[in-house]
Image (cartoon, helix red, strand yellow):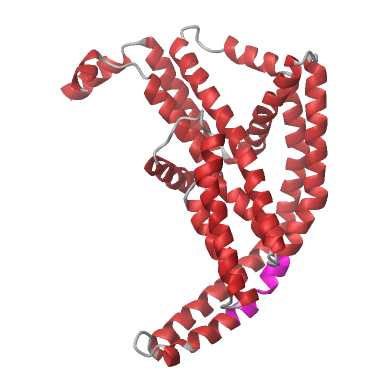
Amino acid sequence: MGVIKDWFRRYFSDPQVVILAVFLVTGIATFLFAGRHLVPVIASLIIAYLLEGVTQSLQRFGAPRMLAVGTVFVIFFLVLLALLFWLLPVLTRQATQLLQEVPDMLSASQTLILSLPEKYPTFFSEVEIENVLNQIRREAGSFTDKMLRQTLSSVIGIITLVVYIVLVPLLVFFFLKDKKLITGWIRHHLPKERGLASRVWQGVDVQLGNFIRGKFWEILMIWGASYLTFMLMGLNFSLLLAFLVGVSVLVPYIGAAVMTFPVALVAYFQFGWTGDLAWIIFAYLIIQVLDGNVLVPILFSEVVNLHPIAIIVAVLFFGGVWGFWGVFFAIPLAILFQGVLNAWPKHPDDADAA
């Protein structure tokens, strides 16, 4: 107990540290217990955060704040309408067609698996193949049941989507329009002795801004490059697969590895064991190599470098806590925690020990 008391006295005797700790605990508790209910607000904050950079650029060219906000919001709203009335229907149609082809893919997989004992009797036995097929049949039945439940609950999903479509643009507009009013209200209700918390936020603010803007452009570039590549090679469901490849960059390392399987499977069932399959996989790998070794260093040169282990741990932890949204926010939250650790006051004894 004495060691714990000494540690607590060493690091929490400063009121600035206590205030920072309270902010962190409050934020984490809010995300844990109310994060799922605040998805439209969080999404709107991210979009407004992204658009604020464009708004400030227009202001630097002499545009009044309200004119800049109005211009940026109109462009954002037009893009949103294009996504809803052009992109979303196309993606939905391709996803439906892909799901309809799943039974044929399973049948072709079964034929391929049944031929393995004849071609490679040393490595595969009929008993092992039968066990694999039974497992595939069980997974296929489970998949069908899940799709049926998703269909039955689609009405609720549509209603939720409509609510989000109305709420998110409205919130984005007010976050942009009343930025000074909102931030002033927040500062008014915060403790005056918040110098450490302010320094942490200033550092994290720069990193998060660079990260969000960088990820936005990375998604667009990888999506566009993948779609152009898949389309020129004649791959089915090119737009859907390219969109998924683009979104997968939100999860470094893991996303690229996971998306290899659907791209390879669709290419295999379309072309079989041919040169076209090899070229598509090769092109996909080239896109990933260029993304990791050229695009990422350019876009994220000013972002705090996170070790791959830290990124994977953040994705696994926050994904396990919040599901999809945990994966989505894993890297920003990791940046926040690293900023806090870097700004946390160091005790002289720690410096001597280091």
Q: Name above or below for residue 187 compared with residue 247.
A: above
Q: Name above or below for residue 26 compared with residue 145.
A: above
**Residue at 38% from the left image edge and 89% from the top image edge:** 125
Q: Position of residue 215 (x, y in %)?
A: 59, 39
The quadrant holding residue 106 is: bottom right
Kindly tell me whether residue 173 is visible in this rendering: yes
Kindly tell me whether residue 251 is visible in this rendering: no
Judged left or right of residue 196, residue 146 is right
Q: Position of residue 208 (x, y in %)?
A: 55, 29
Q: Is residue 104 magenta?
A: yes
Instruction: Kindly give the residue lying farthest to the top in the view shown.
Output: 192
Instruction: Kindly give the residue lying farthest to the left in the view shown.
Output: 2
Q: Name above or below for residue 82 compared with residue 280.
A: above
Q: Which quarter of the rendered picture does the C terminus lie within?
A: top left
Judged left or right of residue 13, residue 312 is right
**Residue at 58% from the left image edge and 66% from the top image edge:** 279
Task: Say how many tags the image has.
Answer: 0
The quadrant holding residue 231 is: bottom right
**Residue at 44% from the left image edge and 90% from the top image edge:** 119
Q: Is residue 168 magenta?
A: no
Q: Which quarter of the rendered picture does the N terminus lie within?
A: top left
Q: Position of residue 79 (x, y in %)?
A: 79, 40
Q: Position of residue 84 (x, y in %)?
A: 79, 48
Secondary structure mainly formed by the magenta segment: helix
311 or 296, nearer to the observer: 296
Per the rendered image, the range of residues in magenta is 96-107
72 or 292, nearer to the observer: 292
114 or 288, nearer to the observer: 288
218 or 76, nearer to the observer: 218
